[in-house]
Image (cartoon, helix red, strand yellow):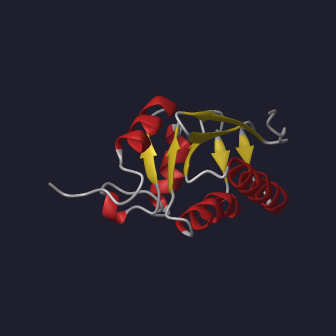
């Protein structure tokens, strides 16, 4: 089965985890934000994913309007008990996320989990039990 093509992202599945790699280097403006909300939401729905990695390795800059796609996917996944991890944040992009407090030093203070790259993000999501894990 072939995957749909998107204008602003590439999607693939690795170990049952949907990986969305954003292709634009600049995420700015309402039109870009709306397009990404639609594309990312459609990719998550089409893959019936509950664990998603968003790879931002190509993104050099983003505006606050372009937090909407990440917040929308996070909300979409939370409704089914899913998880979202961001990765590949360049220093300037990471700073924007830190200044806005969308990511922080501790997991409890962060809206988003962040890993350095796709492999680390996939490892984090595969290490956690999907649901109903028991304490020993």
Q: Position of residue 62 (x, y in %)?
A: 66, 51
Q: Position of residue 114 (x, y in %)?
A: 44, 46
Q: Quadrant of residue 38?
A: bottom right
**Residue located 79% across and 37% down the image:** 3
User: Is 91 placed above or below 101 here?
Assistant: above
Taking depth in this image into account, of 8 and 96 the one nearest to the observer is: 8
Residue at the extreme left of the image, as rendered: 136
Number of numbered markers: 0
Taking depth in this image into account, of 6 and 97 the one nearest to the observer is: 6
**Residue located 51% across and 33% down the image:** 118
Q: Is residue 55 visible?
A: no
User: Is 13 placed above or below 94 here?
Assistant: above
**Residue located 19% across and 58% down the image:** 135
Quadrant location of the C terminus in the rendered image: bottom left
Q: Position of residue 55 (x, y in %)?
A: 59, 39
Asked whether, in this view, residue 99 is left or right of residue 57, the answer is left
Taking depth in this image into account, of 95 and 33 the one nearest to the observer is: 33
Asked whether, in this view, residue 23 is left or right of residue 104, the answer is right
User: Is 79 placed above or below 66 here?
Assistant: below
Q: Quadrant of residue 41?
A: bottom right
Asked whether, in this view, residue 44 is left or right of residue 29, the answer is left
Taking depth in this image into account, of 59 and 2 the one nearest to the observer is: 2
Q: Is residue 36 visible?
A: yes
Asked whether, in this view, residue 41 is left or right of residue 134, the answer is right
Q: Position of residue 40 (x, y in %)?
A: 72, 52
Quadrant location of the N terminus in the rendered image: top right
**Residue located 48% across and 61% down the image:** 102
């Amino acid at each position: 089965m072939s995957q749909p093509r998107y204008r602003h992202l590439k999607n693939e599945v690795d170990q049952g985890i949907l990986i969305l790699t954003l292709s634009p280097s600049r995420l700015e403006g309402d039109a870009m934000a709306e397009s990404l909300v639609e594309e990312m939401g459609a990719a998550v729905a089409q893959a019936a994913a509950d664990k998603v990695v968003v790879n931002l390795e190509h993104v050099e800059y983003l505006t606050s309007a372009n937090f909407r796609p990440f917040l929308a996917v996070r909300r979409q996944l939370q409704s089914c008990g899913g998880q979202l991890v961001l990765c590949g944040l360049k220093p300037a992009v990471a700073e924007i996320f830190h200044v806005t407090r969308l990511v922080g030093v501790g997991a409890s203070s962060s809206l988003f989990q962040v890993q350095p790259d796709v492999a680390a993000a996939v490892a984090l999501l595969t290490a956690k039990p999907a649901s109903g894990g028991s304490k020993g």
